[in-house]
Amino acid sequence: MKKLFKFILNTIPRPILIRLSIVVRPVLAFLLKGNTFTDPIDGKSFRMFLPYGYGSQRNNVLSPSTLSLERHRLLWLYLKNETDFFTATEKKKVLHFAPEQEFYKRFKKQQNIDYTTTDLFSPLADVKADICNLPFDDNSYDIIFCNHVLEHIPDDTKAMQELFRVLKPGGIGIFQIPQDLSRATTFSDDSITDPKERAKIFGQYDHVRVYGRDYFDKLRSIGFKVTEEDYTNKIAPELVEKYCLAKGEIIPVCYK
């Protein structure tokens, strides 16, 4: 199964994968029903989660029902337990880059947010836009989600500046990235263009860097106030295992 999933991820373009998953997802959820792991997004349980990874595959990380990964489930728990995202009575404007399937329909149905999605290629995007040149006014959005996007962007400084520009004063942004917290500094090399080499060095064929611990300070240099939220340490260890979370993953919570 690992080899099959790795082949699929590395050969089928992501927009097509998104469309195919709509058909495959209910079949997988039915076949893998059980009690070992639970997806906190929809509350469904399974005997196993699926493997995932463009290079080395991680076991028990992809939920059969929502197709969420560790980072998605962690973000859901954080939003649910630590914010008023789902409960606020005052309507907030939300901008979501490269919207994840596990969130898209749920956020669309929320009556307390004015929800806009954006991306250059995603079939789920309301607005086709370049993150380095956004078509939105200054100080437009109360909340911005931009997760696992910046590692794809050659000029991530410009992208961060645009995120800061369109976020309202007092607003909040969550900008998750693949993390290598053993690195003090971010590594990038524009001369590496071969997809196989990128997958080997950066972890995925379309990544252009590996972020280190300096990522949070780079966000601060743009103007954000950043809280490095080590949220798995606030969750009971048995639930970290039950929900298949990545222990020690940091959520970058950014304020303007």
Image: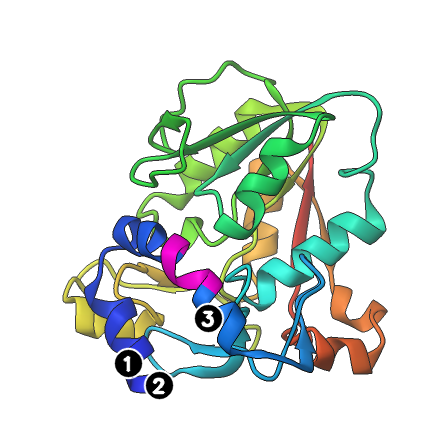
Work out how far the residue at label 3 is from the one at label 2, CA to CA, in angstroms: 13 Å
Depicted 243 relative to depicted 188: above or below: below
The amino acid on which the numbered mark 3 sits, given as a three-letter code, is: Leu
The residue beneath circle 3 is 28
The amino acid on which the numbered mark 2 sits, given as a three-letter code, is: Met
Q: Position of residue 153 (x, y in %)?
A: 34, 47
Q: Residues within 10 Å of mark 3 (few under 14, many from 20)?
A: some
Residue stretch in magenta: 22-26
- Considering every residue shown, the one lying at the far left of the view is 194
- Mark 3: secondary structure: helix
Observer-side mark, 1 or 3, equals 3
Q: Position of residue 168 (x, y in %)?
A: 66, 22
User: Which residue corresponds to the image point at 57% horizontal and 46% vertical from the top-left?
Assistant: 103
Work out how far the residue at label 1 is from the one at label 3, CA to CA, in angstroms: 14 Å
Is 24 part of what is drawn in magenta? yes
The residue beneath circle 2 is 1
Depicted 250 relative to depicted 239: above or below: above
Work out how far the residue at label 1 is from the one at label 2, CA to CA, in angstroms: 5 Å
Q: Which mark is residue 4?
A: 1
